[in-house]
Amino acid sequence: MRIDIVTLFPELCDGFLSTSILGRARAKNLFEAHCHQIRDYTKNKQRQTDDYPYGGGCGMVLYAQPIADCLRAVADQCAQQGRAKPHVVFLTAAGQPYNEETARRLSSYESLALVCGHYEGIDQRVIDTFGDEEISIGDYVLTGGELASLVVADSVLRLQPGVLAEEKGYQDESYWDGLLEYPQFTRPEVWEGQPIPPVLLTGDHNKIDAWRGRQSRKRTRQRRPDLYDQWCATHPITQIPRWKRTERAQLIKADAQLDAAAKLFAEGCRTVCRDVCTEAGLAEYTPEVMRQCLEEERKAGWAFYLHTTSDTPDGMVGVCHKTGEIGHLFVTQSARGSGIGTKLLDFARKKLAEHARPWLAVLDVNTAAIGLYRRMGYLPDGVRNMYQPGVNVAFCKPCKELVMRYQPQDQG
């Protein structure tokens, strides 16, 4: 790949591209880079590159002519090398937001030219004439486009073959698969009283990969809900985890089963509601109260199933054959992340075979559950309840109870 940077400060850009990982890759000719001084293409004695904006206003605007002539020269150089015409990107505050997907797309070009804006901007006519696209690296303003061009250059060039030691070096990182990267740890094993997560010491790569996946999803859900929503929409769960021989999901009949389910129910409610309910409200979620709720709902037509692993209760789910509702899907804290929730949701839907589009309700603060439901084919279908502090005494923050309805894949 050849990359050209059109700038007023070529030394700044060239120094960056000659340092560290990119510098070593450049020395090995894994990519070709050129930084061009815009002033070299001016036609005035002062080598002036800018002037006042038409219509008035603060600042100065870069001339079209020197940038155009520089880009023509770059195109000629590429042609002499037998390369394709460069894909021209202007780094501007008004450009499209930059992300990893764009970096991957740009990395596929044989030749890429990055034009750095400066002062108040660039004469729009040269952008319209030569630009293939405009890119912004964020919703903030810099004094010039050099830093932005280097951000783009770094993110593109690191994807070129051989620049990184191995492909996995960038495939595991933030944004590659649409998620933020999991937390990283190194020696010492305990630092200032803080140990690393024990799973990282097991040597069990399946468990480590599973932990990293959970951490990545959790971090994205908490820090970048916009990315997490996109990821859920593009990563449906198409393969349900296999049930282990020690796993069972049995219809709750005996008192001991009902007691275990009530305990799960109480724990689940306290976990989900801890950020939106008052202490008094959370105190109401006791196994005794939850058992009464389950008994009343059974009389209303609900059936509840208790999930056990090696005869230890660790999950539950309920279905209502009258209405097609799935509810009370809870997994114990110690069993979360093991796929039980996915299995039980699939199990419950199949129990409601007479309902083509079963549905469920979930608090909008329960983003982990919403993510699972979306990936399992459940889409938003309205709001069932709204809770407001003062109106609903148990709540200290407003929240909504959303309805999500199953959408069979063949119905689009």
Image (cartoon, grey):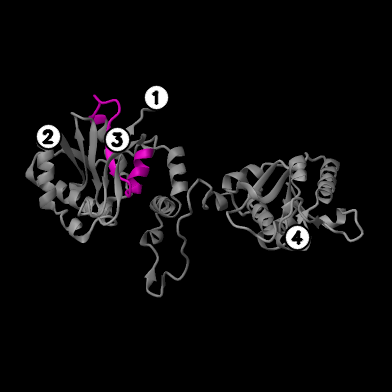
In the foreground, 368 or 209: 368
Write the start and end of the magenta stretch as one range: 350-374
Residue picked out by circle 3: 346
Q: Which mark identifies residue 411?
A: 1
Query: Looking at this view, is 16 or 239 the one in front?
Result: 16
Q: Is residue 231 in the magenta section?
A: no
The first of marks 4 and 2 along the sequence is: 4
Residue 286 image point, x, y percent = 14, 54
Q: Nearer the viewer, residue 355 or 25?
A: 355
Mark whose residue sits in front, 4 or 2: 2
The furthest residue to the bottom: 192
Q: Earlier in the sequence, mark 1 or mark 2?
A: 2
Within 10 angstroms of label 4, few (less than 14), some, or many (20 or more) residues? Answer: some
Q: Amino acid at mark 4?
A: Asp
SS at mark 2 in the image:
loop
Q: Quadrant of the C terminus?
A: top left
* Image coords of residue 243 (percent x, y): 28, 39
Name the mark nearer the viewer: 4 or 1. 1
Considering the numbered disc 4 on the image, is that residue within a helix, a strand or a loop? helix
Front disc: 1 or 3: 1
C-beta proximity under 8 Å, tags 4 and 2:
no
Q: Secondary structure at mark 1?
A: helix
Residue mark closest to the camera, 3 vs 4: 4
| Label 3: few (<14), some (14–19) or many (≥20) C-alpha neighbours in 10 Å | few
Type of residue at label 3? Asp
Q: CA distance from mark 4 to mark 2?
A: 73 Å
Q: Is residue 350 above or below residue 122?
A: above
Please tell me which of labels 3 and 2 falls first in the chain: 2
Q: Disc 1 marks which amino acid?
A: Gln
Seen at 84% across and 51% down, the residue is 66
Give the residue drawn at x 12%, y 34%: 300
